[in-house]
Amino acid sequence: MPAIYSARHDRMKYGDIKLYTGSSCPDLAAGIARHIGLELCEREIVMFPNENLFIQLHSSVRGQDCYAIQTTSAPVHRNLMELLILLQTLRLDSAARVTAVVPYLCYARSDKKDQPRIPITARLVADMIEAAGADRYIFLDLHAGQIQGFFNIPGDVLTAFYTLIEYLKDKKAEMYRPVVLTADLGFAKKARNFAESLDTPLAFIEKRRVSNDSKAQALTIIGDVKDRDVVIVDDEVDTGGSMIQAVNLARESGARNVYMVFVHPVFSANSADRLSALPVTEFITTDTIPIPQEKLVKFGGRLKLLSIAPLLGEVILRANEGRSVGELFNE
């Protein structure tokens, strides 16, 4: 079947793209819409005095290809419920296809039973997204890749790696003998991709986490960071504990300038205060999670925010037209 006919056939099957968003990431959703060349569809979201949520679409989506854009960062449970209700609203209005576009998926760390008598909450979230009416999903940099196996529906798990690495390649010219340092051995494989693309050495931090404590102790650096600029990479920064220990250990080991690179800026509790006080030359992250202005100003211009809106917008276009997403990454 000719490619042009195939793409047209899929558009006829699923209809036009309709973009909807909850209240968690309006700027990112607007950026996705701009990339595609569409307007966000209007909807009403109301929280009643009893904290129950209500959503109403302002126009019909019958027979259309609908995308619900919602990141599930704090307030986690409101944002998650908004996503679920929005998905069900689109399904009950007879959308031809409903896709959950979730740049940051909550509960992604609860992906296995590594202690007695605990839940696998990531699986529960997957079940709820399916039950709410999603036909597909689009996620970005899941903390654990096996979460894909919790779903019985197809989807795309994207990565911000290419967005981050292009910026770092330009930045490399300013660095002195750079080395990539991973703050966690669990991120070692992805950190290797950064090192290979930048053509730099790779170093590791050995640390240990005790039971379900959110804190882990950094023990030592495996590799050479002395008299080098260090690029510390991780998937997300939550409380900032691992990154803070990594920065301090790198500086104690003789590192020069330190660059902190991560995908998801969770910045819970007082982490923005603690991170901004570190001797870090630049913080490089993405807009998967909106950062409140009061936290942004703490970094004094040292935080570089890269948008993943073009990536998500292009994937939505390709999904609608039935084209390969892997071609974007030469896969």
Image (cartoon, grey):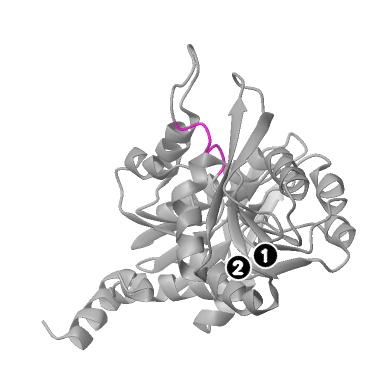
- Measured as percent of width and height from the top left, residue 275 is found at 81, 49
Q: Is residue 196 above or below residue 12?
A: above
Point out the stretch of residues depicted in magenta: 106-111
Q: For the residue marked with disc 1, what is the amino acid?
A: Pro
- Measured as percent of width and height from the top left, residue 180 is found at 58, 58
Toward which corner of the image does residue 52 lie, by quadrant? top right
- Measured as percent of width and height from the top left, residue 294 is found at 88, 57
Q: Name the residue under label 2.
A: 29
Q: Name the residue under label 1.
A: 26
Whether the magenta-drawn stretch holds residue 202 is answered as: no
Per the model, the C-alpha gap separating discs 2 and 1 is: 5 Å
167 vs 36, left or right, is right
Q: Is residue 207 above or below residue 238?
A: above
Residues at marks 2 and 1 touching, judged by CB atoms closer than 8 Å: yes
Toward which corner of the image does residue 1 lie, by quadrant? bottom left
Q: On residue 328, which mark appears?
A: none
Toward which corner of the image does residue 81 lie, by quadrant? top right
